[in-house]
Amino acid sequence: MDITGETILITGASSGIGRALAISLAEHNIVIALGRNATKLAEMANGSDNIHPLIFDVSDATAIHELERKLQQLVPHIDRIILNAGDCRYLEPEHLEWSHFDRMMDVNFFGWINVLRASMPLLEKSQHPHVIGVASQVVFAPFSRASAYGASKAAAAYFLKSLALDIAYKNIDTSVIYPGFIDTPLTQKNDFAMPFLMSVESATERMLGAIAQRKREYIFPKRLKWLLNVSKIAPNFWFHKMTWYPNE
């Protein structure tokens, strides 16, 4: 199933998965690329007449009405919204940085809400509206240092799955995508082993297939999900394997 002739809004479009999705979808669609890096967004727009860059920080709730105004000036409707923007900050157990929780929720959770508030009026004008949220497989098992990041992604996934029940009467489809480790600038900062690490190209291809089919949930790679199921099958074993110890 191909995605053609649509108007698609993508957040976090200046790098990583968002950038790859924007470039791929712009071949046959109008893409509104949201991001904070003006230079990278401009470079993308220079490479395609179908890419319309918009500078926007998804965590800035004060700019929602301005974003709504700009979107309405730009396009008559939006067919799909891909909520992809995200951030990841890990806690250091010996010196807990509580502000990380604020940052993770502002970007990964409230970021979805802020963009939907601004774009929902245009989405409702589409004949086949679709909202896609990019979560993470971190929600399926507890990991050391990931309490802020994992909680924000879990909240976002629950939010969209629950919201789906309330907007179904408007014929708005929703999808939540749970990727594993993808080789992006964000994950390249990680200081731990990342099982089943995938390239951006491979991840983008899989995500586009799931988006085209409007799958309500899509989890990949499956091998990682099977591994994370150990946390449910043998929670005590998982706890002792994942527990953080100083100077280890």
Image (tube, rainbow, N blue to C red):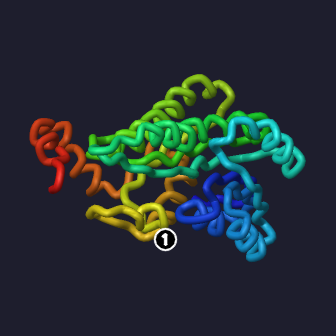
Q: Of 126 and 42, which appears nearest the observer?
A: 42
Please report the residue visible at 56 percent of the width from the left and 39 percent of the height from the top: 106
Please report the residue visible at 31 percent of the width from the left and 54 percent of the height from the top: 222
Disc 1 is placed on an element classified as helix
With 150 as the anchor, is 241 left or right in this view?
Answer: left
Q: Quadrant of residue 223?
A: bottom left
Please name the residue that numbered disc 1 is placed on. 201
With 144 as the anchor, is 111 left or right in this view?
Answer: right
Q: Is residue 120 above or below residue 192?
A: above
Q: In the displayed orientation, state which residue is furthest to the right.
A: 73
The 10 Å Cα crowd at callout 1, few under 14, some 14 to 19, many 20 or more, is: some
Report the amino acid beneath label 1: Glu
Q: Of 74 and 130, which appears nearest the observer?
A: 74
Q: Of 180 and 58, which appears nearest the observer?
A: 58
Q: Position of residue 65 (x, y in %)?
A: 80, 36
Q: Quadrant of residue 69?
A: top right
Q: Is residue 27 visible?
A: no
Q: Position of residue 20 (x, y in %)?
A: 58, 67
Q: Is residue 109 above or below residue 205?
A: above
With 192 as the anchor, is 198 left or right in this view?
Answer: right
Q: Is residue 4 visible?
A: yes
Quadrant for the N terminus, please: bottom right
Please report the residue visible at 82 percent of the width from the left and 46 percent of the height from the top: 71
Q: In the displayed orientation, state which residue is furthest to the front.
A: 95
Q: In the displayed orientation, state which residue is furthest to the bottom.
A: 47
Please report the residue visible at 68 percent of the width from the left and 28 percent of the height from the top: 170
Quadrant for the C terminus, please: bottom left
